[in-house]
Image (cartoon, coloured by chain):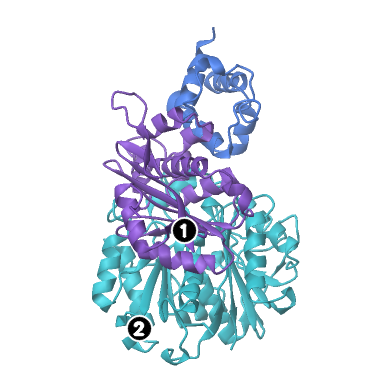
C-alpha cells in the first residue's frame, strides 16, 4: 500500500469535509472532479491548493497548474513526489 | 411616481456626488497599488479612502453619507415615522465587532439623526445595493413608508482581501472589466446614499424617477457565475416587463463588470440573450474597485450624475474585447442625453438584481 | 387569505415540524446536532457536509418543510417562490472560522470564505430546488414578524406566489431557527403577527 496515497485520501476527506466518504471509498485512479468520481468543484480545487501547502509544504501559485495535478489520487501523489524531488 | 435623488457618494474620489463626478469626468481612478497588504505581504491594487482609519470606519462612513444627504432634502423627514433607512452592506463593521457587525452602527445612526425606526440592513452579497434600492422603491410604492433612505457601505478589510486572494480572484493590476486581459477584481471601499420618495417636494434638487426592479437567483452555484446568465436574464426581463419598457427605450447599461473572467463573460451572454448587446455599456469598477455591498448604490448614484450631466463615462480599464458575445463598451467619455438607464448587479449566492432610472 | 402552510423550528435540543418533534439531540453522539438530523431523516445531499452552519440549518429546515408539504415545487413555477430570510448575527460564526483559518500560520480557506455571507443559504436552497425567484436576506436585531409581513405583501403583489421565510440564528452558543412557508389558501393558520410570534416561540399550533 502506498502510504502517501492513503494519507492524501485522509487529508482530502478532512480538508474538504467529505464526511460521507471513507478512505476505502476513494480509488487511486478515480476522477476527483467528475460526477462519477468524487464530484469536486472549483472551490474544492482551491482548497486542494491549501492542502498541498498545509500538509506537504508545496506552494502552487497558478491554479491552472493544479488542473493536471488534481485529476486523481494517482496524479496528486506523482505531482507531490516530482515537486519534492526537484 | 417614485422619485430618487439627493445622491451622495463618499469614495477615494471625493466626499460628494459632485466631487466624484468631477473625477469621473476626467477618468481619474481611486485605485492605487498599496504596498504589502496581501496575505503574503504582496503589493495589491486597492481603492481605499485616504484618511479613513481607526476604529468604527464603517460607522464613520455611514454617518458622513447620511449627513451629506440630510443637506439635500427637507431635513424634517429624517425624524418622521413615515421614513425608513435601509443599509446595504456585506461585512459592515466586521473589524470592530465580529459578532455584531451592524447593530452598533444602526443604533448610532438612529440616535445621531433622531430616526423614528432602527435601520434595516440588507446583506445579499454584491447585489445588496441594487436590491436595497428596489426594496426602497417597493416600500414607497406599497405605501408602507413615504420616504426610504438607502445607504450602501463597505470598508476594506484583510478578511475580504485574503478571502478573494484564496479564490485567486484578485487582479494583479487595476481591474479591467470586460477586457480580454482581465484577471480578477480590485477591492474598494466607499459609501453612497440616496433618497427614494413619493414626494417630489422633499428634494432640494430635481430628482429622477426610480423604476424599481426585481431580483432572480441563478440556482447554479454559490460562488461561480452562471454559464448561461439565466438569473440576470430573468431579473432584467422582469424589470423591463414590470414597467412596460422595451429594449429600444434603454439608452445605457451600467453593468456589474467585476473584472473576473467568468462574471464578465456571464454578463455578455445575458445581455446578448436580452438583445441589449448594442447598448452603450460600462462598468464603474475601474474607478471605485469592487465595493461589494456599497457597489449598487455608488454605481446607481453615478448613473444619476451621468443623466444629470448628459454624459457617458468610459469603462476604465477596457481595451480589447474579451467576451464570447460582443458588447458595446464605452471607450471614451461622450456627451449624450440619457432618458432611461439600466443598472444591474450579480453576486455570490447566485443573486442578480436590476433597476432602471428615468429622466423626469 | 395568506396562510402559514408549514413551519419548522430548530433549536439547540430538538427539531419540530408543524409543532411535532421530528428529532431530538443525542448529546452522547459524536455527530454534530445538524448531522444527527440529516442522518435520522435519511437525507441524501453530500453537499450538506461542505456547508456552513447557516446553510446546513436552512437546508435541513427547508427539506423537512417540503416533506411535510409535498408538491410545493410542482404547484409553483420555478420563479414563483420567493425566499425572505433574516437573522441578527449575519454569518459571524463562519466569519470567525475563516479568520481562524489564516491566523496562527494557516492559509485562508477558500471553502470557508465562500460561506462568509449570510445570503449564501438562499443560494444553496435555490440551487437544490432550481428556484429562480426573488431572494432577500436582512440583518435585524431580533425576530420581528412585521418585517416578514411587510415584505411578503410586496413580493406577493409583484409576481411571487409563495414565500419561504426564515429566521436563521446559529451561533456557537445558540440555535434559533424558524422557517415557514406562506401560501394563498382559503383556510388555515392566518399569516399575521400574532400567529408568527406564537409559532416562532412555542413551536405549537395556535389553539384555534
Q: Quadrant of the N terminus of chain B?
A: bottom right
Q: Position of residue A17 (x, y in %)?
A: 46, 30
Q: Secondary structure at mark 2?
A: helix
Above/below status of B54 relative to C61: below
Quadrant occupied by the C terminus of chain B:
bottom right
Q: Nearer the viewer, residue A67 or C188?
A: C188
**In the picture, residue B358 is in which quadrant?**
bottom right
Chain designation of label 1: C
**Residue at the location (64% across, 67% down)?**
B238
Q: Position of residue C27 (x, y in %)?
A: 28, 27
Q: Is residue A76 above or below residue B109?
A: above
Judging from the image, what is the letter of the chain drawn in blue?
A: A
Specify the label residue B70 is tagged with: 2
The residue sitting at 48% across, 17% down in the picture is A7
Q: Is residue B26 above or below residue B41?
A: below
Residue B281 image point, x, y percent: 66, 70
The count of marks equals: 2
What color was chain B assigned in the picture? cyan
User: Can you identify the residue that label 1 sits on?
Assistant: C3
Chain in purple in the render? C
Residue A26 seen in the current view: yes
On screen, residue B287 versus residue A54, left or right, reads right
SS for tag 1?
strand
Rendering coords of residue B182 (x, y %)? 63, 54
Amino acid at each position: 500500500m502506498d502510504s502517501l496515497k492513503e494519507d492524501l485520501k485522509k487529508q482530502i476527506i478532512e480538508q474538504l469535509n467529505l464526511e460521507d466518504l471513507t478512505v476505502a471509498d476513494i480509488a487511486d485512479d478515480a476522477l476527483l472532479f467528475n460526477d462519477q468520481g468524487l464530484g469536486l468543484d472549483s472551490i474544492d480545487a482551491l482548497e486542494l491548493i491549501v492542502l498541498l501547502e498545509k500538509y506537504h509544504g508545496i506552494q502552487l501559485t497558478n491554479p491552472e497548474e493544479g488542473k493536471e495535478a488534481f485529476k486523481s489520487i494517482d496524479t496528486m501523489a506523482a505531482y507531490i513526489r516530482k515537486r519534492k524531488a526537484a | 411616481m417614485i422619485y430618487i435623488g439627493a445622491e451622495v457618494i463618499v469614495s477615494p474620489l471625493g466626499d460628494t456626488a459632485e466631487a466624484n463626478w468631477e473625477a469621473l469626468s476626467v477618468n481619474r481612478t481611486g485605485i492605487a497599488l498599496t504596498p504589502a497588504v496581501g496575505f503574503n505581504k504582496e503589493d495589491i491594487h486597492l481603492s481605499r479612502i485616504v484618511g479613513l482609519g481607526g476604529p468604527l470606519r464603517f460607522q464613520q462612513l455611514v454617518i458622513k453619507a447620511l449627513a451629506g444627504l440630510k443637506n439635500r432634502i427637507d431635513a424634517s423627514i429624517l425624524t418622521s415615522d413615515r421614513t425608513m433607512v435601509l443599509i446595504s452592506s456585506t461585512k459592515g463593521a466586521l473589524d470592530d465587532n465580529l459578532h455584531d457587525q451592524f447593530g452598533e452602527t444602526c443604533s448610532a445612526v438612529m440616535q445621531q439623526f433622531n430616526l423614528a425606526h432602527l435601520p434595516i440592513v440588507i446583506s445579499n452579497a454584491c447585489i445588496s445595493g441594487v436590491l436595497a434600492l428596489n426594496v426602497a422603491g417597493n416600500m414607497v410604492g406599497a405605501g408602507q413608508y413615504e420616504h426610504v433612505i438607502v445607504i450602501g457601505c463597505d470598508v476594506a478589510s484583510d478578511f475580504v482581501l485574503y478571502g478573494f486572494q484564496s479564490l485567486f480572484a484578485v487582479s494583479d493590476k487595476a481591474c479591467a472589466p470586460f477586457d480580454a486581459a482581465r484577471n480578477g477584481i480590485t477591492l474598494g471601499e466607499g459609501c453612497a446614499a440616496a433618497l427614494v420618495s413619493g414626494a417630489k417636494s422633499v428634494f432640494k434638487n430635481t430628482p429622477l424617477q426610480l423604476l424599481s426592479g426585481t431580483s432572480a437567483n441563478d440556482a447554479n452555484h454559490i460562488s461561480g457565475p452562471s454559464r448561461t446568465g439565466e438569473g440576470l436574464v430573468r431579473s432584467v426581463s422582469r424589470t423591463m416587463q414590470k414597467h412596460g419598457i422595451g429594449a429600444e427605450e434603454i439608452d445605457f447599461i451600467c453593468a456589474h463588470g467585476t473584472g473576473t473572467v467568468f462574471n464578465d463573460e456571464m454578463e455578455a451572454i445575458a445581455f446578448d440573450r436580452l438583445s441589449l448587446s448594442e447598448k452603450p455599456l460600462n462598468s464603474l469598477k475601474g474607478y471605485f474597485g469592487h465595493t461589494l455591498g456599497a457597489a449598487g448604490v455608488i454605481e446607481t448614484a453615478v448613473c444619476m450624475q451621468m443623466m444629470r450631466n448628459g454624459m457617458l463615462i468610459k469603462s476604465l480599464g477596457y481595451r480589447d474585447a474579451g467576451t464570447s458575445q460582443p458588447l458595446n463598451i464605452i471607450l471614451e467619455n461622450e456627451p449624450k442625453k440619457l432618458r432611461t438607464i439600466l443598472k444591474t448587479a450579480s453576486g455570490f449566492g447566485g443573486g442578480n438584481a436590476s433597476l432602471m432610472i428615468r429622466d423626469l | 387569505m395568506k396562510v402559514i402552510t408549514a413551519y419548522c423550528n430548530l433549536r439547540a435540543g430538538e427539531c419540530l415540524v408543524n409543532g411535532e418533534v421530528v428529532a431530538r439531540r443525542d448529546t452522547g453522539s459524536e455527530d454534530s446536532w445538524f448531522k444527527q438530523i440529516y442522518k435520522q431523516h435519511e437525507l441524501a445531499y453530500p453537499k450538506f457536509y461542505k456547508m456552513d452552519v447557516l446553510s446546513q440549518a436552512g437546508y435541513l429546515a427547508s427539506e423537512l418543510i417540503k416533506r411535510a408539504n409535498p408538491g410545493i415545487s410542482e404547484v409553483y413555477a420555478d420563479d414563483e417562490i420567493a425566499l425572505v430570510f433574516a437573522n441578527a448575527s449575519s454569518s459571524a460564526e463562519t466569519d470567525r472560522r475563516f479568520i481562524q483559518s489564516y491566523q496562527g500560520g494557516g492559509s485562508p480557506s477558500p471553502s470557508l470564505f465562500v460561506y462568509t455571507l449570510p445570503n449564501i443559504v438562499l443560494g444553496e436552497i435555490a440551487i437544490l430546488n432550481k428556484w429562480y425567484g426573488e431572494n432577500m436576506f436582512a440583518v435585524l436585531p431580533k425576530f420581528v414578524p412585521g418585517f416578514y409581513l411587510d415584505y411578503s405583501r410586496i413580493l406577493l403583489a409583484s409576481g411571487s406566489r409563495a414565500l419561504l421565510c426564515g429566521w436563521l440564528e446559529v451561533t456557537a452558543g445558540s440555535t434559533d431557527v424558524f422557517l415557514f412557508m406562506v401560501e394563498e389558501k382559503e383556510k388555515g393558520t392566518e399569516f399575521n403577527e400574532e400567529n408568527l410570534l406564537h409559532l416562532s416561540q412555542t413551536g405549537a399550533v395556535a389553539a384555534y
